[in-house]
Image (cartoon, grey):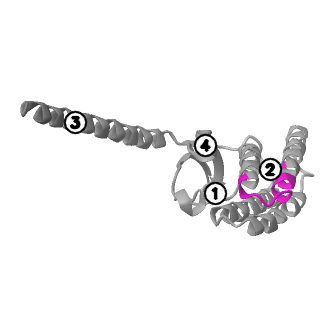
Amino acid sequence: MKRLPFFLLIIACFACQSKKSDAQEEIVADEAAGDDIKSIPPLYTIDPIAQQQVSDVLTAYLRLKDAFVKSDSALVIKEAQSLPSAWDAVEKNNFNDAAQKDWQEYEKELQKHIAAIQGTESLEAQRRAFSLLSETMHSVLAAFGSNKKTYWDYCPMAFHDEGAYWLSNAEEINNPYFGDAMLHCGRVKEIFE
């Protein structure tokens, strides 16, 4: 009888050690996954003035991202207003036909996502629309590049483990989907240079 509790204690210790090993393996796997960062060159070459203007669009997006990091719905709505004007300022005269067509498609998406962000005070709904806006902005940078080093970050836990991406100007993770609750949850997936 005395051996049974001792035996259960030994089994429990091994079970805890096993769980600890599994958790450690997950951490190692996540860290190893971070080593697969891709550097993305732009699809199109555009003149330096237009390149700076695309970077200005990115700057407006990054201010919006920072408002999400602060979890401030009113600031999100305010910052969302500056993105369309930055977008409109881009001189597309020197874009080739394919680049102009892509730019117009991205513009439609941008307008739709900005309207969704501005159309609600629900931070959760705004974050969903921001996730879609982030995908569009990723496409913009993949097509046109930026004169700023930019990181494409991913949080696997966003939206009840659906996962979501965003752009950042810093390697340090500041998660716009959780704010202070899980500020540093995520990892860099790609870099635009």
User: In this figure, which residue is indicated by the disc labeled 4?
Assistant: 160
Q: Which residue occupies 66% across, 43% down?
A: 41
Q: Earlier in the sequence, mark 1 or mark 4?
A: 4
Badge 3 marks a residue whose secondary structure is helix
Which mark is on residue 46? Answer: 2
* Amino acid identity at mark 2: Ile
Task: Give the number of the mark in front: 3 or 1.
Answer: 3
Label 2 vs label 4, nearer the camera: 4
Of the two numbered discs 1 and 2 on the same chain, state the one appearing first in sequence. Answer: 2
Which SS class for mark 4? Answer: helix
Q: Earlier in the sequence, mark 3 or mark 1?
A: 3
> Which quarter of the image is occupied by the N terminus?
top left
Name which quarter of the figure residue 19 lies in: top left
- Callout 4 amino acid: His
The quadrant holding residue 89 is bottom right
Is 12 in the magenta? no
Q: Nearer the viewer, mark 3 or mark 4?
A: 3
Please give the range of residues in magenta.
113-124
Amino acid at the residue labelled 1: Pro
Discs 3, 2 touching: Cβ within 8 Å:
no
Q: Nearer the viewer, residue 57 or 17?
A: 17
Sequence order check: which comes first, mark 3 or mark 4? 3
Contact (Cβ within 8 Å) of mark 3 with mark 1: no
- Give the CA distance from mark 3 to mark 4: 31 Å
> Which residue is disc 1 drawn over?
176
